[in-house]
Amino acid sequence: MCFFGQRKFVAAVSALKRAIYLDPFLSITAYNLGLVHLSLGQLASAFHFLSAAINLDPAFAPAYHYLGVTLAKLGDLPHAKKAYARSLQIQDDYMTHLNFAASLCRVGELGPAKGEFLEFERQFRKLKEEEQESD
């Protein structure tokens, strides 16, 4: 992922695929490779690796979150909704609410999108207040 941070995508994919070759049952490697493919717009590959990460670790909420993003970009909103819902069931995260709202808004489901966005705002505001209190 250091290569990914430096925007050296070919090197990132290569290193992560080698890591999967060395340890194919490590879910975080499949998850990271899914993120790299998602950022490159290679949605089928992102789906493949994020699904593999979920199969290896079904309790890892971020994998469901980004699987939802991938499915929404692929135009499969019913399954994207299920992935987002599963992510939120495991871990209620403000970023999942934001991406869920964006996905719903993109297809014109403004009512549910507004609800998700309001939940994002509430959690984000709460997080900022807690941060200010700790300072």
Image: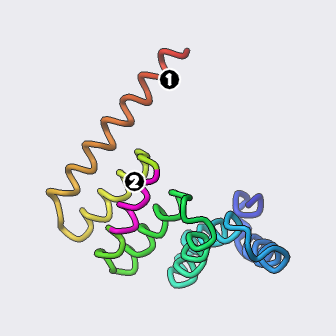
State which region is magenta.
82-90
Q: How is the image coloured?
A: rainbow
Identify the residue at image location x=52%, y=76%: 41
Is the C terminus in the top left, top right, bottom left or bottom right quadrant? Answer: top right
Q: Residue furthest right?
A: 22
Residue type (three-letter) at the residue carrying disc 1: Glu
116 up-or-down from 54: above or below: above
Quote the CA–CA distance across marks 1 and 2: 22 Å
Left or right for 2, reference 43:
right
Q: Which residue is mark 1?
A: 131
Q: Quadrant of residue 71?
A: bottom left
55 up-or-down from 134: above or below: below
Say which label, 1 or 2, has the lower sequence index: 2
Nearer to me, 135 or 51: 51
10 up-or-down from 95: above or below: below
Q: For the residues carrying marks 1 and 2, which lies nearer the camera in this image?
A: 2
* x and y percentages locating residue 96 in the rendered image: 41, 53
Q: Which residue is mark 2?
A: 88
Residue type (three-letter) at the residue carrying disc 2: Leu
Magenta segment: does it hold 88? yes
Q: Residues within 10 Å of mark 2 (few under 14, many from 20)?
A: some
* x and y percentages locating residue 82 in the rendered image: 34, 68
- Tag 1 secondary structure: helix
- Tag 2 secondary structure: helix
Magenta segment: does it hold 8? no
Kindly identify which numbered label has been placed on residue 45.
none
* x and y percentages locating residue 1 in the rendered image: 73, 61
Q: Main secondary structure of the magenta part?
A: helix
Left or right for 122, reference 93:
left
Identify the residue at image location x=85%, y=76%: 22
